Image (spheres, grey):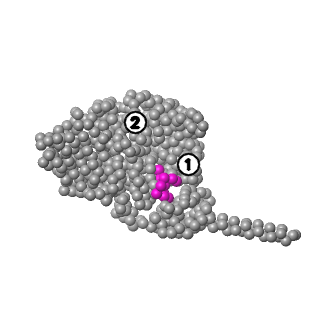
Amino acid sequence: MKKKDLLHIFFCIMVFCLSVKVSTAQSRREEIEIKAGQKYLNFPISESDELKKTRIIINGKVFDEFTLSLSQNKPDYWVFFDVSNFQGKTLYVESENLGNQQAGFDKIYADKTFPGKEELYKEKMRPQVHFSSQRGWLNDPNGLVYYKGEYHLFYQHNPYGWKWGNMHWGHAVSKDLLHWNQLPEGLYTPSHDDMAFSGTATFDPNNTSKFRKNGIDPLIATFTSTGRGECVALSYDNGRTFKDYEGNPVVKHKGRDPKVFWYQPGNHWVMVVYDESHSRDIGKDLKAMNLEFSIYNSPDLKNWTYQSSIPGFFECPDLFQIDVAGEPGVKKWVVYAADGKYKVGNFDGKKFTEEQNLKTYDNGGMATFYASQTYNNIPDRDGRRIQIGWARINIDSMPFNQCMAFPTELKLKKSFDGYRLCPTPINEIKNLYKKSHTYNNIVLNEEHPDYTAPVNGDVIHVIAEFERGDSREFGLNINGYELSYNNLFNELNKINYPIEDKKIFKIEAIVDKAIVEVFINDGELYFIRPLNSVAAEKQVKAFAHTFNKESKSILKKLEVDELNSIWPENP
């Protein structure tokens, strides 16, 4: 063999060894034994580092696959994987292409707690009466259902970072729609390319699906699997763990976000789902989407048949029947989309017939309210149509991001411009009252143009009732956020709202550390705004701007209720 050949072989061996060394340095797999009492597998996070694909392997199978930014230096915060259901088992953590994030991987550990837990729910900007996840990003509420004495709130969740991604179904339960107990994830993602998008939870007391087992009718999640289609998962332990239905997917199309409910008159199930199947080509790499919801029927939650479509909607449908307020015995069907646009009409189980075209009850113009759902299976003795939506508000510099809107009761009312869907805070909010303050019959005029209540706070419920009078405008300033109604132009904060027939004008607001939620005249107008009440000058001030000495408005009633936190003292 020639010398140059030997050198070439030696060179190749060195390159191979170097590549193995580099590959080994870039990827890592670690065995971790979960000991009794350990609940958390902890990951150090830095928002400035690159996302690395990571997986948790249990019993030789990938249980959860996701991306996260492992901190090579001091973490911005820690996130966790809940190992409560894996006591005594051995799992593996595996990360790819770590590079300089090896140091972060080496910090992963299991423990009975997680760093920062002592501050949980006490963080500076943590909403105190709006649900937020312990860690990570939150968006659409999913699977709202009352089941075996618990209100379930599933939600789109990135447990591993502050930004959108890694879509799991987070899970929390409540006995009163106020105080929430966060549980381990409801739906995991064994493949990062197959996320668990939005959907519905229901159950089947008639056993039409034949899913009953050992006398238990399971909690049934119907959701969009981004890699497969509309899928079903079953839980026989009150939603604590789910297992995929072997016949998945049950519907395959270009769409997402199924809402499923039982239609008693037709003795069948209904699925209403956002559908892009009918998009058409309009040129090179372009499509014109026919934005619509599709309606499917099924006898058993497994076999679905397309029935009809409803045009004009995008994402996260809901479809329900509701009483018309003030008209005993009159009911209408409402269909709405993620952005709060809705139609009113009738539904025969297969086709929606429109009676009133699109309106919206998110009137803020900033799309901060999104992707709401109403609860399935609310008991007949209750009878309310209860809704939770996503409040799209960034909560900066915290180990969590976004929150849910406060639970509301929906009512359908005849108003000045037709049917209006009106949300108001559920009555249970009164159970959070810590101190209540009421002030009555305060005249606001040129001599006394404003009144500041001798109470303040960053977590409060405010109700004000004005007699409009003949002032130019009147309203409230709450912790720096102003709500002003212009009597001349019939506008609230430049939102057109003609109400000449109303003498009393009601402003209601739920103020939290990072958010204000506004309800005008019992929900005829509704919107959400970001509000840093922590940093704000805390005040509740009523005001009126008058034309002259004779003009005035009257603050008939001002109620300011300080609110207790929904969170436990020692989680």
The quarter in which the N terminus is drawn is bottom right
For label 2, the crowd category at 10 Å Cα-Cα, with few meaning under 14, some 14 to 19 and many 20 or more, is: many
Image check: 424 left or right of 140?
left
Q: Nearer the viewer, residue 206 or 18?
A: 18
> Residue 29 sits in which quadrant?
bottom right
Q: Is residue 184 above or below residue 500?
A: below
| Amino acid carrying mark 1 in the image | Asp
Q: Is residue 39 above or below residue 240?
A: below
Distance from the alpha carbon under mark 1 to that under mark 2: 33 Å
Q: Position of residue 546 (x, y in %)?
A: 17, 43
**Residue positioned 29% across, 33% down in the render:** 415
For label 1, the crowd category at 10 Å Cα-Cα, with few meaning under 14, some 14 to 19 and many 20 or more, is: some
**Residue positioned 55% across, 48% down in the render:** 244
Q: Is residue 275 visible?
A: yes
Q: Position of residue 283 (x, y in %)?
A: 59, 35
Q: Secondary structure at mark 1?
A: strand
Q: Determine the residue located farthest toward the bottom in the rendered image.
A: 3
Residue located beneath label 1 in the image = 244
Question: Which is nearer the N-term, disc 1 or disc 2?
Answer: 1
Magenta stretch: helix, strand or loop mostly:
loop
Numbered mark located on residue 342 in the image? 2
